[in-house]
């Protein structure tokens, strides 16, 4: 029995303590905490990731859901069964009112019900089985058709398709990005002359460099007026936890660019067997003249290809560097899956205008640029006040 109070009967159907069967489109459902998943269930989850490229993202792994669950309450996993076999997995967070959201909402760049090919479900029955009045998402993979009528907007999520180069980094860069190669290599040579030999470590295991990255990123958030994610202790602890994970389907990868012995830029993100998620990238602002952020992304992509990664997911959002780097775009959905329930109606009325206003600003350069300037002004005032 899982600690949520739902157990599985002899026919494989999930039952609550009142004895009612929980089903979605003929699929039996059980609900568990992440730590209560069996080894067989985790293996089935990994198998579903391997069988469909759209579910290969590390944010869709049981390891990521378990990581969030260690630092936030209310994380649960709905497991779909057919003929007694686990065939689908929906990680989510649930509050006491039955309001649900994709696990890691605000941090995760990919969300989905991970399932084996051919599995279908009824969304309303799924929500009822999970005890949810609503389920909010903002990076739902496009292939999740049963959620389709609940999607309020679709957005581009750029990716880089990778293949290993035949030579060194410079040869790979010239082949993959001929337009950026000359200027980038020139800046790297200048950095080497001015500071020290440029070297890159794809999988740096020194936790001091992870702390340095978070310090740089916090300073960047403050300069630009954004919310400082690393001011939240649970996110700091989560990143440290994921950094220590080195599993087949999930590894926390810290990459660092050095000039001599001095770290210049760093990136931390999770990877699965074939996908690396670009998550937190930052650099020492003393070296901004050399474009260290772009150097970091290019070095990471080249090294990731040599380590078996086939796709770098840059995440949803309009950024100039993403337009330079991307080879194509995925589509991700935002919205609220709901079932008839007064709590769902109130939650949607509260959240939808906020999301709509943000998306309107982000979609129009005439609005986005003044908003960015305002945030930077706020950040500068904040920094001056701290000083």
Image: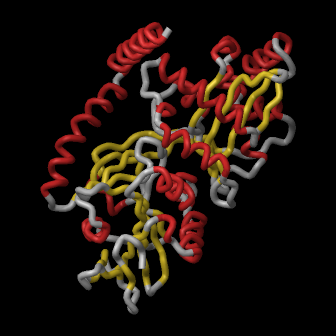
How has the structure been colored for display?
secondary structure
Q: Quadrant of residue 126?
A: bottom left
Q: Is residue 145 left or right of residue 316?
A: left
Judging depth in this view, the residue of 379 and 231 nearest the camera is 231
Q: The N terminus is located in which quarter?
A: bottom left
Identify which residue is drawn at 73% across, 17% down: 183
Q: Is residue 337 visible?
A: no
Residue for point 47% across, 28% down: 228
Q: Looking at the picture, how far across and down is residue 89, in whole percent?
A: 45, 67
- Residue 76 picture location, percent across and down: 41, 63
- Front residue (pair 175, 111): 111
Nearer the observer, 273 or 248 = 248
Q: Quadrant of residue 216?
A: top right
Outermost residue on the bottom side: it is: 10
Instruction: Between residue 190 and residue 331, name the one nearer to us.
Output: 190
User: Does residue 325 appear to the left or right of 261 in the view shown?
Assistant: left
* Location of residue 125 in the rendering, given as x and y in whole percent from the top left corner: 26, 70
Q: In screen coordinates, is 365 left or right of 162?
A: left
Q: Up-down: is 137 above or below 218?
A: below
Q: Is residue 35 above or below residue 82?
A: above
Count of numbered circles in the view = 0
Q: Where does the image place residue 73, in percent across and percent down from the top left?
A: 40, 54
Q: Residue at x 25, y 34 (%)?
A: 354
Residue 84 visible within the image: yes
- Seen at 46% across and 7% down, the residue is 384
Q: Relative to residue 198, is residue 95 depicted above or below?
A: below
Q: Is residue 161 above or below residue 123?
A: above
The answer to whether residue 220 is left or right of residue 184 is left
């Amino acid at each position: 029995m899982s600690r949520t109070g739902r157990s599985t009967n002899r026919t494989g159907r999930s039952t609550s303590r009142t004895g009612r069967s929980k089903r979605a489109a003929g699929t039996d459902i059980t609900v568990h905490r992440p730590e209560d998943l069996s080894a067989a269930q985790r293996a089935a989850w990994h198998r579903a990731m391997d069988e469909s490229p759209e579910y290969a993202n590390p944010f869709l792994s049981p390891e990521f859901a378990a990581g969030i669950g260690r630092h936030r309450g209310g994380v649960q996993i709905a497991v779909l069964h057919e003929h007694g076999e686990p065939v689908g997995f929906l990680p989510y967070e649930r509050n006491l009112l039955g309001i649900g959201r994709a696990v890691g909402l605000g941090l995760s760049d990919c969300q989905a019900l991970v399932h084996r090919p051919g599995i279908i479900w009824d969304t309303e029955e799924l929500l009822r089985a999970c005890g949810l009045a609503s389920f909010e998402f903002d990076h739902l993979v496009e292939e999740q058709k049963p959620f389709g009528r609940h999607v309020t907007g679709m957005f581009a999520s750029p990716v880089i398709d990778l293949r290993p180069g035949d030579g060194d980094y410079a040869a790979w860069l010239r082949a993959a990005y001929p337009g950026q190669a000359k200027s980038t290599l020139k800046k790297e040579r200048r950095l080497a002359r001015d500071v020290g030999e440029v070297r890159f470590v794809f999988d740096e295991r020194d936790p001091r460099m992870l702390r340095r990255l978070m310090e740089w990123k916090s300073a960047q958030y403050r300069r630009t007026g954004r919310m400082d994610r690393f001011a939240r202790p649970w996110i700091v602890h989560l990143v440290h936890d994921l950094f220590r994970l080195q599993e087949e389907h999930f590894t926390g990868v810290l990459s660092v660019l050095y000039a001599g012995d001095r770290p210049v830029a760093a990136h931390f993100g999770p990877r699965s067997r074939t996908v690396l998620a670009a998550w937190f990238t930052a650099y020492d602002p003393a070296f901004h003249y050399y474009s260290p952020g772009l150097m970091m992304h290019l070095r990471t992509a080249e090294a990731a290809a040599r380590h078996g990664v086939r796709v770098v997911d840059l995440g949803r959002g309009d950024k100039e560097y993403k337009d330079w780097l991307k080879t194509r775009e995925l589509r991700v959905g935002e919205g609220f899956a709901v079932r008839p329930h007064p709590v769902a109606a109130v939650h949607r009325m509260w959240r939808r205008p906020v999301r709509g206003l943000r998306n309107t600003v982000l979609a129009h350069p005439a609005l986005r640029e003044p908003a960015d300037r305002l945030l930077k002004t706020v950040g500068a005032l904040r920094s001056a006040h701290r000083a």
